[in-house]
Amino acid sequence: MNFHILLVHFPIALLSVYVAIELVQLVFFRRAVWLVHAKTVILWVGATAVVPTILAGIVIHEPFERAVPELLNAHRTFASLTAGTFLYLALCYAIVAIIRVTPPWATALRHRFPGTYGVLSAIAAGSTIRPVVQGLALMGFCFLLITGALGGALAHGRDIDPIVSFIYSIVVE
Protein backbone atom coordinates (compact mmCIF):
# COMPACT_ATOMS: atom_id res chain seq x y z
CA MET A 1 0.00 0.00 0.00
CA ASN A 2 1.20 3.51 -0.82
CA PHE A 3 1.38 5.18 2.59
CA HIS A 4 3.28 8.14 1.16
CA ILE A 5 0.12 9.50 -0.44
CA LEU A 6 -1.75 9.08 2.86
CA LEU A 7 0.96 10.78 4.95
CA VAL A 8 2.23 13.55 2.71
CA HIS A 9 -0.60 16.02 3.19
CA PHE A 10 -0.23 16.27 6.98
CA PRO A 11 3.26 17.82 6.98
CA ILE A 12 2.33 19.99 4.01
CA ALA A 13 -0.64 21.43 5.90
CA LEU A 14 1.13 21.79 9.25
CA LEU A 15 4.29 23.35 7.84
CA SER A 16 2.23 25.71 5.68
CA VAL A 17 0.31 26.86 8.75
CA TYR A 18 3.60 27.30 10.64
CA VAL A 19 4.98 29.51 7.85
CA ALA A 20 1.74 31.50 7.71
CA ILE A 21 1.98 32.18 11.45
CA GLU A 22 5.62 33.26 11.09
CA LEU A 23 4.64 35.70 8.33
CA VAL A 24 1.57 36.99 10.17
CA GLN A 25 3.83 37.79 13.09
CA LEU A 26 5.74 40.20 10.86
CA VAL A 27 2.82 42.60 11.31
CA PHE A 28 0.40 41.27 13.94
CA PHE A 29 0.66 39.54 17.31
CA ARG A 30 4.39 40.23 17.62
CA ARG A 31 4.47 39.64 21.35
CA ALA A 32 1.75 36.99 21.63
CA VAL A 33 3.33 34.25 23.73
CA TRP A 34 0.43 31.89 23.05
CA LEU A 35 1.13 32.16 19.32
CA VAL A 36 4.80 31.35 19.84
CA HIS A 37 3.78 28.21 21.72
CA ALA A 38 1.22 27.28 19.06
CA LYS A 39 3.61 27.71 16.15
CA THR A 40 6.30 25.79 18.02
CA VAL A 41 4.02 22.79 18.49
CA ILE A 42 2.80 23.01 14.88
CA LEU A 43 6.40 23.14 13.65
CA TRP A 44 7.51 20.22 15.84
CA VAL A 45 4.60 18.02 14.77
CA GLY A 46 4.93 19.03 11.10
CA ALA A 47 8.70 18.53 10.99
CA THR A 48 8.39 15.20 12.79
CA ALA A 49 5.70 14.09 10.33
CA VAL A 50 8.13 14.70 7.48
CA VAL A 51 10.28 11.75 8.56
CA PRO A 52 7.73 8.92 8.10
CA THR A 53 6.50 10.64 4.95
CA ILE A 54 9.97 10.55 3.41
CA LEU A 55 10.47 6.95 4.55
CA ALA A 56 7.16 5.98 2.94
CA GLY A 57 8.30 7.72 -0.24
CA ILE A 58 11.53 5.74 -0.25
CA VAL A 59 9.54 2.51 -0.02
CA ILE A 60 7.52 3.26 -3.19
CA HIS A 61 10.25 4.88 -5.31
CA GLU A 62 11.14 1.93 -7.57
CA PRO A 63 8.44 2.22 -10.28
CA PHE A 64 9.12 5.96 -10.55
CA GLU A 65 12.87 5.36 -10.68
CA ARG A 66 12.43 3.34 -13.86
CA ALA A 67 9.81 5.60 -15.47
CA VAL A 68 10.97 9.15 -14.65
CA PRO A 69 14.34 9.10 -12.88
CA GLU A 70 15.12 12.80 -13.38
CA LEU A 71 11.79 13.87 -11.95
CA LEU A 72 12.14 11.49 -9.01
CA ASN A 73 15.65 12.77 -8.26
CA ALA A 74 14.45 16.38 -8.32
CA HIS A 75 11.52 15.49 -6.04
CA ARG A 76 13.86 13.64 -3.68
CA THR A 77 16.33 16.56 -3.61
CA PHE A 78 13.68 19.16 -2.79
CA ALA A 79 12.04 16.86 -0.24
CA SER A 80 15.43 16.60 1.50
CA LEU A 81 15.87 20.38 1.41
CA THR A 82 12.36 20.84 2.81
CA ALA A 83 12.91 18.30 5.58
CA GLY A 84 16.34 19.71 6.43
CA THR A 85 15.09 23.28 6.66
CA PHE A 86 12.08 22.53 8.85
CA LEU A 87 13.90 19.99 11.02
CA TYR A 88 16.63 22.59 11.60
CA LEU A 89 14.02 25.17 12.61
CA ALA A 90 12.35 22.62 14.92
CA LEU A 91 15.73 21.85 16.48
CA CYS A 92 16.37 25.56 17.01
CA TYR A 93 13.02 25.95 18.75
CA ALA A 94 13.82 22.92 20.93
CA ILE A 95 17.19 24.38 21.87
CA VAL A 96 15.58 27.70 22.77
CA ALA A 97 13.07 25.81 24.91
CA ILE A 98 15.87 23.96 26.73
CA ILE A 99 18.13 26.99 27.19
CA ARG A 100 15.55 29.67 27.96
CA VAL A 101 12.43 27.97 29.22
CA THR A 102 13.96 25.25 31.41
CA PRO A 103 16.76 26.91 33.42
CA PRO A 104 17.56 23.80 35.51
CA TRP A 105 18.39 21.89 32.32
CA ALA A 106 20.43 24.81 31.04
CA THR A 107 22.36 25.10 34.31
CA ALA A 108 23.16 21.37 34.36
CA LEU A 109 24.20 21.48 30.71
CA ARG A 110 26.37 24.55 31.27
CA HIS A 111 28.28 22.91 34.15
CA ARG A 112 28.66 19.41 32.71
CA PHE A 113 29.20 20.24 29.04
CA PRO A 114 30.38 23.86 28.72
CA GLY A 115 31.44 23.49 25.07
CA THR A 116 28.13 21.99 24.05
CA TYR A 117 26.29 24.64 26.04
CA GLY A 118 28.21 27.35 24.17
CA VAL A 119 27.26 25.92 20.78
CA LEU A 120 23.62 25.49 21.80
CA SER A 121 23.54 29.02 23.22
CA ALA A 122 24.84 30.40 19.93
CA ILE A 123 22.18 28.48 18.01
CA ALA A 124 19.52 29.68 20.45
CA ALA A 125 20.69 33.27 20.04
CA GLY A 126 20.64 33.00 16.25
CA SER A 127 17.27 31.32 16.19
CA THR A 128 15.63 34.16 18.07
CA ILE A 129 16.55 36.68 15.38
CA ARG A 130 13.14 36.97 13.75
CA PRO A 131 14.26 37.86 10.20
CA VAL A 132 16.53 34.82 10.16
CA VAL A 133 13.79 32.47 11.35
CA GLN A 134 11.19 33.99 9.05
CA GLY A 135 13.62 33.84 6.13
CA LEU A 136 14.33 30.16 6.80
CA ALA A 137 10.60 29.49 7.14
CA LEU A 138 9.91 31.20 3.81
CA MET A 139 12.78 29.33 2.14
CA GLY A 140 11.43 26.04 3.54
CA PHE A 141 7.99 26.92 2.21
CA CYS A 142 9.45 27.50 -1.27
CA PHE A 143 11.14 24.09 -1.06
CA LEU A 144 7.83 22.62 0.10
CA LEU A 145 5.95 24.11 -2.85
CA ILE A 146 8.51 22.81 -5.34
CA THR A 147 8.50 19.38 -3.70
CA GLY A 148 4.70 19.27 -3.84
CA ALA A 149 4.60 20.34 -7.47
CA LEU A 150 7.14 17.70 -8.42
CA GLY A 151 5.20 15.11 -6.41
CA GLY A 152 2.07 16.14 -8.29
CA ALA A 153 3.96 15.66 -11.55
CA LEU A 154 5.04 12.19 -10.41
CA ALA A 155 1.51 11.18 -9.44
CA HIS A 156 -0.55 12.86 -12.15
CA GLY A 157 1.81 13.90 -14.95
CA ARG A 158 3.67 17.12 -15.57
CA ASP A 159 0.76 18.79 -17.35
CA ILE A 160 -1.65 18.50 -14.41
CA ASP A 161 -1.76 22.31 -14.03
CA PRO A 162 0.19 25.37 -15.19
CA ILE A 163 2.14 25.80 -11.95
CA VAL A 164 3.32 22.18 -11.94
CA SER A 165 4.27 22.50 -15.62
CA PHE A 166 6.19 25.69 -14.92
CA ILE A 167 8.10 24.24 -11.95
CA TYR A 168 8.75 21.04 -13.90
CA SER A 169 10.19 23.02 -16.82
CA ILE A 170 12.50 24.98 -14.53
CA VAL A 171 13.67 22.21 -12.22
CA VAL A 172 13.66 19.04 -14.32
CA GLU A 173 14.11 20.03 -17.94
Image (cartoon, helix red, strand yellow):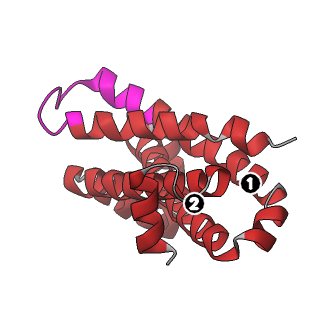
Q: Earlier in the sequence, mark 1 or mark 2?
A: 1
| Residue located at (78% from left, 59% from top) | 58
- The amino acid sitting under disc 2 is Ala
Which residue occupies the extreme top position in the image?
34
| Residue located at (52% from left, 40% from top) | 12
Tell me: residue 66, above or below residue 28: below
* SS state under label 1: helix
Q: Residues within 10 Å of mark 2 (few under 14, many from 20)?
A: many
Do we see residue 152 in this rendering? yes
Q: Nearer the viewer, residue 97 or 7?
A: 7
Was residue 16 drawn as part of the magenta stretch in this picture?
Answer: no
| Residue located at (49% from left, 45% from top) | 94
Which region of the structure is painted magenta?
A: 24-40
| Residue located at (35% from left, 59% from top) | 139
Distance CA(mark 1)–CA(mark 2): 10 Å
Mark 1 and mark 2 in contact? Answer it, CB < 8 Å: yes
Quarter where residue 49 is shown: top right
Q: Tell me the tag on residue 79.
A: 2
Which residue occupies the extreme right position in the image?
1
Which residue lies under the disc numbered 1? 57
Would residue 7 be found to the left or right of residue 19 on screen? right
The picture places residue 157, in percent across and down from the top left corner, at: 61, 56
Q: Tell me the tag on residue 19.
A: none
* SS state under label 2: helix
Was residue 35 drawn as part of the magenta stretch in this picture?
Answer: yes
